[in-house]
Structure formats: C-alpha cells, structure tokens
Image (cartoon, rainbow, N blue to C red):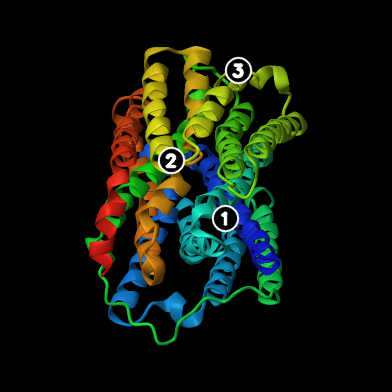
Amino acid sequence: MSKNYKTSFYTLTILFFLWGFTTVLNDILVPYFKSKFNLGDTASMLVQTTFFGAYGIGAFAYYIYSKYKTDLLNKIGYKNGILIGLLLSAIGTALFFPISYINNYYVYLLPLFVIGIGFTILQIACNPYVTLLGEQKSASSRLNLSQGINSLGTTLAPIIGAFLLFNSEDSSVTATDIGIPFLILSSIFLLTFVFVKFQNLPDYKNDAFINKVDVLTIPQVKLGMIAIFLYVGAEVAIGSKLLEYLTLENIMGFDKDIAGAYVGIYWGGAMIGRLSSAFLLNQELTLNKRVIYSALSTIATVVIITFAIQITTKLNFYDIYPILFFIPIQFMGLFIFRDSNQMTLGTFSGLNVILLLTAFIFKGEIAMWSIIAIGLFNSIMWSNIFTISIENLKENTSKASSLLIIMITGGAIFPLFMGIVSDKYNLEYAYLLPIIAYFYIFIFGIKSKSFKHKLSKQTE
C-alpha cells in the first residue's frame, strides 16, 4: 500500500470508530428509555427501528438516484460523500441536547433518524473506499482492520454509556445525562469533518460514468443483501436486549451498570476477531508475523476491555476470564480458513447457531457466556459478506454497496420481531430468533464459492 493510501486508510479508521461508538450507544438507550418512559419491549425497540430504518430509506434513495440519474459517489467523489455524512451525523447528535429538555420518548427518534441517514452515506462511501485503497487480494484484510477499529467503538460505547446512564439513582431524563454526552459527540464529528476536509485523500469519481448494469441480477449481490439483512438484524437484536437478558434472575440477575459492562464484552469479541483476522489475512506479511501480530492484537483487546470495565465498575479480569475459552476457538477458525472468506463465514455462523441453542437449554453463566461469545464469531461476518458481495464489480461497486447498505434495515426489523416475541412469551424465547439468521449465513458462506464462476457473464 502506498504512503498516500496508508494515510487515507488511517483517516477512514477514525470514521469507522465514530459510527461504531455511536451506533452501539443504542444498546444502552433501549433499556434506558424503557425504564425512564415505562415502555414495553416492542416500543423500546423503536430506537433501533428508527435508526436502522434510516439506513434503508437513505440507501434506497441513493440506489434509485444512481439507477435513473447517475451514481452520486462516482459524480461528486467519495471524499465529498464522506463529508456530507459527517455533517449530518454532527447535526443529529447535536439535536439530542435541545430535545433532552422536551422529555418525550418519541421526539428522541428524530435525531436517531438523522444520525442514521448520516451513517448511511458514510457506510456507502467508506466500505467500498477501503477496498479500493490497495490490491483486491488484501481488500478483506483492510476491511477487517477497519471493522476492528469500528469494534473498539462498539466495545467502549456500552461500558461508558452504562456508566453514565445507570450509575445514578436519579430517575429523571435531563440534558446532563443525555444531551451533553451527545453534544460532545457532535463536536467530535465536526472536528473530524474539518480534519477530513483538509486531508489529501484519493478522490475516486467518474463524471462521464453511465451505469447500465442492473446489479440486482448478479447472484452474489442478491444473496449478499439477504445475508447482510439477517446478520445486522441478529447482531443488533442480540446486543439490544443483552443488558436486560443479563438482569434476569435465572440468567445472572446483574444490576444494569454491571450488565452494561458485559454488553461491552460482547462487542469486544467482534473487535478481537476483526483485528486478529486483519493481520492473518494480510498477505504483505510473512505467516509468522501474521500469527504474532494477530495474537498481540488479541491480548491488547483483552487488556483494553479489562481496563475499561475496571474504571467504570467493580469488575476485574477474574469476572471476565471465561471469554478466554472461546478466543482460541475463534483464532483456530481464522487461521485454518485464512485463505477462504467463504469457509470462515460458514464455520462461524454455524458456531453461533450452536451457541444460541446452548444458551436456551442452559441458564446462568453457561447461557451468559454462550451469548457473549457470539460477538467473537460475528466479528468477520460484515467484512466477509460485504467483500464476497462486491468482489470484481469494478465501476458497479458503489451501486452494489448502496443495495447492501439498504439491508442494514435488518437492524430495524429483526429487533422489533424480537421485542414482539419477548412481550408475547419471554426474552429467552426471543433469543432463539437469531438462529434463523445464522443458519442462512451458514448456507450463504458455503455456497458463495460458486459466485465467481457466474459473475463474468452477468457483468459483460
């Protein structure tokens, strides 16, 4: 990777961190609003429905525009697309401050929608942008590394969020406990906007480009869209209700601030896998270096998680050490299938099916760690599904990317169904729903080897 590409890549990782951190704050807002406004599970899930629904609306509008007019990112450039996304994200997070004085749950959905639109544009631009910054063979490695930094944000957000919102006996919703943290976050988005504005990023665009290929006719895109929908839906649904799940007496009976720390460990598992796989898949390194760097990144992640929960709760390493049982299993899977995105995806989704069944059959710590360990095996799913779906699409990449981003609406719809099942039966039964998602992803991973043979005919 050239020096300019490296600078651009490191700049993009900042964006991955920011939207990861902000997105997973929703996992804390769901139980927080449920408690503050005395909501049911279905109503509280409107947080995720609104936020991820914005992805669907924004990405669908982008796809329609690119289909009948011109591909917007190819016209204005990826950098300008990123700047627009950052500005909308800054506006959305800033809106939390004045709205916090209104003290109405449904009004809070407005800034969540605006943030979702901003993140839609960032996702459409940044995910394919990362794959373009270097050789195609290392695209998955770069995307996994970016997703690893994204997961640093998703790891820290629930730990910090739970500390800020549940570490007080004050039951009132005020600008201090909701508005000010989001106002600070808005300032960070604005600073990042200025930083990116003056960065010399490669600005991919093609003013004369006319896209005649209907990417919906390409098998890898169609099936990848379903896989993204189900993966995001399952991941978000599990994370959204995990805090409440861990407060159940027959699971762990934790207080909410302690449960929030364990939600951070769930997301931290994704960080471990993404960073580890980023090094294992980096073909610019020798195999020995890949293994060493992967192991060091895993150790560093565990240290970060331990430090974060120690300064926000009374927990320490001895409270989280059972996760170490699952990390070697994840590492072995990444190492054995390091040259096959398809097999890694199939194996990890199959393991998640087993973990969900284990959690349903057993209670207590076995159930808790089975659910938390799913985060480890979720780690490579986004990058692997995304890379498989856009591989070799060339000038059709951003259009296919917009379709994949539309399917992030899985995070809006799947949690809503989980809330309905939880209201009708109980939360433990609701945790069976993600099995449907992971079983499909298992089939997608195993079958996706045949896509490359069909692609050339579709894009001629």
Relative to residue 24, is residue 215 drawn left or right?
left
Relative to residue 185, is residue 350 drawn left or right?
left
Q: Amino acid at mark 1?
A: Trp
Q: Which of the 4 quarters of the picture holds residue 19?
A: bottom right
Q: Residues within 10 Å of mark 2 (few under 14, many from 20)?
A: some
Where residue 80 appears, as percent x and y from the top left, is 55, 77
Relative to residue 441, is residue 331 drawn left or right?
right
> Is label 3 in a helix, a strand or a loop?
loop
Q: Nearer the viewer, mark 3 or mark 2?
A: 2
Q: Is residue 403 above or below residue 319?
A: below
Residue at 65% across, 19% down: 321
Residue at 72% across, 21% down: 317
Residue position marked by numbered label 2 in the rendering: 340
Image quarter hosting the C terminus = bottom left
Residue 322 image label: 3
Q: Residues within 10 Å of mark 3 (few under 14, many from 20)?
A: some
Residue position marked by numbered label 1 in the rendering: 19
Q: Nearer the viewer, mark 3 or mark 1?
A: 3
Query: From this viewpoint, is residue 43 visible?
Result: no
- Whichever of labels 2 and 1 marks the residue nearer the N terminus, that label is 1
Q: Is residue 435 above or below residue 137?
A: above
> Is label 1 in a helix, a strand or a loop?
helix
Q: CA distance from mark 2 to mark 1?
A: 28 Å
> Is label 2 in a helix, a strand or a loop?
loop
Where residue 156 appears, as percent x and y from the top left, is 65, 41
Q: Is residue 141 above or below residue 85?
A: above
Nearest the eye: 132 or 437: 132
Q: Amino acid at mark 2?
A: Ser
Residue 216 image label: none
Q: Amino acid at mark 3?
A: Pro
- Whichever of labels 3 and 1 marks the residue nearer the N terminus, that label is 1
- Whichever of labels 3 and 2 marks the residue nearer the N terminus, that label is 3
